[in-house]
Image (cartoon, rainbow, N blue to C red):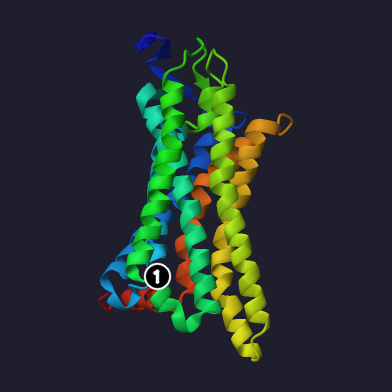
Amino acid sequence: MMLASGNTSSHPASFILLGIPGLENSQFWIAFPFCVMYLVAVVGNIIILHIIRTDHTLHEPMYLFLAMLAISDLVLSSSTQPKMLAILWFHAHEIEYHACLIQVFFIHAFSSVESGILMAMALDRYVAICFPLRHSSILTTAVVVKLGAVVMVRGLLWVSPFCFMVSRMPFCPNKVIPQSYCEHMAVLKLVCADTRVNRGYGLFVAFSVVGFDMIVIGISYVMILRAVLRLPSGEARLKAFGTCASHICVILALYIPALFTFLTHRFGHHVPRVVHIMFANVYLLVPPMLNPIIYGVRTKQIRDRVIRACCGKDL
């Protein structure tokens, strides 16, 4: 059944999400590791947030950015995983039209937010290593809050047109989305109209957000590397590299599957669909799971607080 949406377009009442095409017989079992990863992401990020909120000694730029990253991870993973598990376990393949567009918005908006936070964290590491004596005066709490607000507003403003433009277009009778969640390009392929403007805007957003963030991150780490290599002490160099190692791991965990998914949607016509769909799931699930683990292990203050909690002492 098609419903009117304005005067110029129509849309189906719902879409059908297939889950993981090609692995239908294994989907039930694949859902278990997905569920474990989602639980680790939720519990880990909530613990990170609780520790930073309750320990006033952690109200510093690095930890405030880490708290923003944890919030972004919770939103990003929770926008897709409950529905994905319902599909894989209970065959709840149908998703209402507006719920699908909301999912598109949250996925892309908070992917942008996450990228922006990683860029801000790279700038924080650059200032901390290259200008250690001025770090607290340059990155004040007010500056950190403003950076977080800019990153959030950028994500919301840049991604909102996705949903608006798609909602104004007519859809074909086919309403099957061959993956586990609603993503902009996947929904756009169901439109029965010229989508060149939508695709062009998608490329603009990708390059203006992710491209800009990656350039800033790259420049920051080049400057950090130069500063670290000039340190006279080998122990100091090792400590500086260790400080940045966790952040680099988080950056790679986000950008590698994200870029693979983005490029495959547009240019990877010969990539097997099952490989594409699995990477698309990894892109939204693995970074939120890894971030609290990596920072929990690599950051002494957070690690010590978790150990104290596990030993029965109050946080």
Q: Is residue 121 left or right of residue 25?
A: left
Q: Residue 138, located in which quarter of the rendered image? A: bottom left
Residue 2's x, y, as percent? 40, 9
Residue 191's x, y, as percent? 52, 17
**17 up-or-down from 83: above or below:** above
**102 up-or-down from 47: above or below:** above
What element does badge 1 sit on? helix
- The residue at the point 39 percent across, 79 percent down is 304
- The residue at the point 53 percent across, 39 percent down is 205
Quadrant in the picture for the N terminus: top left
Between 206 and 171, the residue placed more toward the observer is 206
Residue 43's x, y, as percent? 37, 58
Answer few, some or many: residues within 10 Å of disc 1's Cα (few below 14, many 20 plus, some between 14 and 19). Answer: many
Does residue 261 appear anywhere in the picture?
yes
Which amino acid is tagged 1? Answer: Pro
The number of callouts visible is 1
Instruction: Single out the residue that lies furthest toward the right.
Output: 270
- The residue at the point 62 percent across, 45 percent down is 259
Q: Is residue 35 left or right of residue 205?
A: left
Does residue 48 appear anywhere in the picture?
no
**253 up-or-down from 159: above or below:** below
Residue 269's x, y, as percent? 71, 29
Residue occupied by mark 1: 61
Q: Is residue 134 left or right of residue 283?
A: left
Q: Residue 51, located in which quarter of the rendered image? A: bottom left
